[in-house]
Amino acid sequence: MKNLKIFIILIMIAGITGVSGNAFALSQPNIDCQSGSICVHPGDFMTYSTEFEKVSSIETYTFGDHIGTDKVSVSITSVLNGTKIQSNNILDLKTGFYNETANGSGLPILVMAPTPINIGKNISGVSEKTQNFIGSQRDVVSVANNTATATNEIGYDKETGVLMYLHLIPKSANAVTSILDVSFPTKYDLINTNMFANSVTQADLQIPSWIKNNAKWWAQGSLTDDDFTKGIQYMVQNGMMKIPHTQSDSSLPHQIPSWVKTSAGWWANGQISDIDFVKGIQYLANSNIIHV
């Protein structure tokens, strides 16, 4: 985990870990999220193109079931030179740390910040900009730090707290003056996520009302996984059901997680919205379980 430790140090030296401190201030959180905590839902994921010491990789964070009210499972998958490495972790939504020990120490999940984020207007290097991401215009909170040895910048999506990019670029390979400086570029760039689907409105969705019967039977075990996914696939491909398109991600696990079936049952019973149900369908499409 050498690279991860370096990454954490670099974030700290760049002065951009204070997402809940002076640089950023929390505004009103989403209704279904706790105040002052990270907001994620089962099935949310982010995939990044990363670079450490001139070595490129693809890294995916996938959030699973909630554990009580304060924690959630998170799977971190890295693909490096064709080799996949996966770790299963538990994230504390209030502290932002995963792999916590008994004394409360752990690793910060730097790809997420508490949401939504407001800008500290008078903080040097802090700004707000608009970034195009797969056809979606996102408001990004950015912190830039330009030193004699490096140019550092990090940006978080203002609404969701998703890390959009992190660029730590040394100005010279020989410019290392302290243990916190680096002689190689370090980069994180978001390339795929379904976290922005919550901007979808009810008008964007077309779900036949009778689909709830299928969802209910599936959640109860009366309908097989194969029959349910084939039914969804058929309806989407034939225009009977419309869901917002998201880019597929081959690094996600190719099996239906339990939370998708649970969510289908909740939706059938009116306990969650159409948008929350569609997130599960998008996950199945992103992980190539169904092809739409």
Image (cartoon, rainbow, N blue to C red):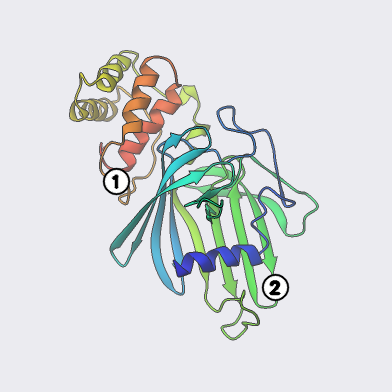
**Residue tagged 2:** 147
| Disc 2 secondary structure class | loop
Q: Are marks 1 and 2 in contact (CB under 8 Å)?
A: no
Q: Secondary structure at mark 1?
A: loop
Residue drawn 27% across the image and 27% down it: 232
Q: Could you tell me which quadrant the C terminus lies in?
A: top left
Is residue 249 placed above or below 16 in the rendered structure?
Answer: above
Give 233 or 122, whichever is nearer the viewer. 122
Q: Quadrant of the rendered structure where residue 241 is? A: top left
Residue that badge 1 annotates: 253
Residue found farthest to the bottom: 174
Mark nearer the viewer, 1 or 2: 1
What label does residue 117 carry, if any? Answer: none
Amino acid type shown at disc 2: Thr
- The single residue placed furthest to the right in the displayed view is 122
Disc nearer the start of the sequence (1/2): 2
Q: Amino acid at mark 1?
A: Pro
Name the residue rendered at 39%, 20% in the picture. 266
Height in image: 158 above or below 218?
A: below
- The local crowd at label 1, few if under 14, some if 14 to 19, many if 20 or more residues have their Cα within 10 Å, is some
